[in-house]
Amino acid sequence: MVILWKAKFKKFHNFQKLLEKFLSKEEIVRAFRYKFNYLRSNYIIARGILKILLAFYTNCDISNINIKNGKNGKPYIDHISNIKFNISHSSEWFVIGIGYNYELGVDIEKETYKNYLSLAHFFFTKEEYFHLLDLPFKKQRKLFFQIWVQKEAFVKAEGVGLQFGLNQFLVSCNNKPGLLKIYKKKFPYSQWKLYFFSPEKFYFGAIAVNKKISKLSYYSIIENIINKLIPIVLPKN
């Protein structure tokens, strides 16, 4: 089973002091490295809620949720192998993906008016780039973001990092997501599946998993849910 949780940062500003208490010393240091207050706040909110959810799904005290980074920066829960997770944020929203015995990666992007053709020329395969150029101008932006979130979700799921090269693999260029080809030989990819979702209007999202999902659950994180979960995950005296 794979579960997606979405939330809006500003709805949890009143929780920030409480959520900060669930962060480790290293996580607090990382939070205060952010130059701007809103980025610091966003990190604390997302990290705190992530740890609450992981404690709930692993049936652990939140104090035992120790998040580490692997070789290529992919986060994992120390000493827990059957629960995988990934997180992505863009502008006002963040999304957390949690899977039981699934490798997964998630990415969301808010639709913007960035110079997407220049980015596509640099990061996309030739097939993807020319497919984009063949479309009418009004449809190009949507396809750009659909391709982009698929690519980001896959490299995050595989844990290969951006050094793998976004132009080293081909994804679907239509409304049915998929990983079509990897140009590196002997790199297994046929088991990987990609799925689209949209956390909000004007946002694009994709999740990559290492096998077909029988059920993808999608929920909104609201204040009431967090209030109910906190007593469950706190250490038992």
Image: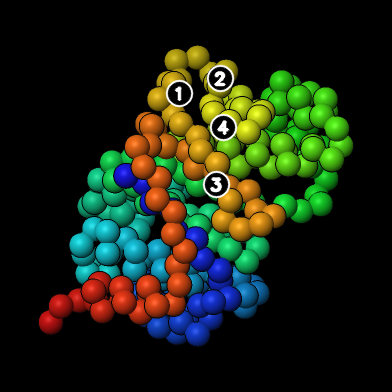
Q: Quadrant of the C terminus?
A: bottom left
Identify the residue shown where x is 69% and y is 42%.
Answer: 145
Place of residue 116 in the rendered image (x, y in percent of width and height, measured from the top left): 79, 42
Circle 3 crowding by C-alpha within 10 Å: few under 14, some 14–19, many from 20: some
Q: Amino acid at mark 1?
A: Tyr
Q: Is residue 175 left or right of residue 195?
A: right
Q: Which residue is mark 4?
A: 177
Circle 3 SS class: strand
Q: Quadrant of residue 231?
A: bottom left
Mark 2 or mark 3: which is in front? 3
Q: Which residue is mark 3?
A: 197
Q: Quadrant of residue 121?
A: top right
Give the distance between the C-alpha atoms of the residues marked 4 and 1, in whole angstroms: 14 Å
Q: Between 235 and 146, which is closer to the camera in this rendering? A: 146
Mark 3 or mark 1: which is in front? 3
Give the distance between the C-alpha atoms of the residues marked 2 and 1, in whole angstroms: 8 Å
Q: Which of the two labelled residues, at mark 3 and mark 1, occupies the earlier sequence position? A: 1
Q: Between 27 and 207, which is closer to the camera in this rendering? A: 207
Q: Amino acid at mark 4?
A: Pro
Q: Amino acid at mark 2?
A: Lys
- Relative vertical location of residue 4 with respect to residue 186 in this rendering, above or below: below
Residue lying at the far left of the rendered structure:
237
Q: Which of the two labelled residues, at mark 4 and mark 1, occupies the earlier sequence position? A: 4
Q: Which residue is mark 2?
A: 181
Identify the residue shown where x is 34% and y is 64%.
Answer: 53
Circle 2 SS class: strand
Q: Quadrant of residue 54?
A: bottom left
Q: Which of the two labelled residues, at mark 3 and mark 4, occupies the earlier sequence position? A: 4
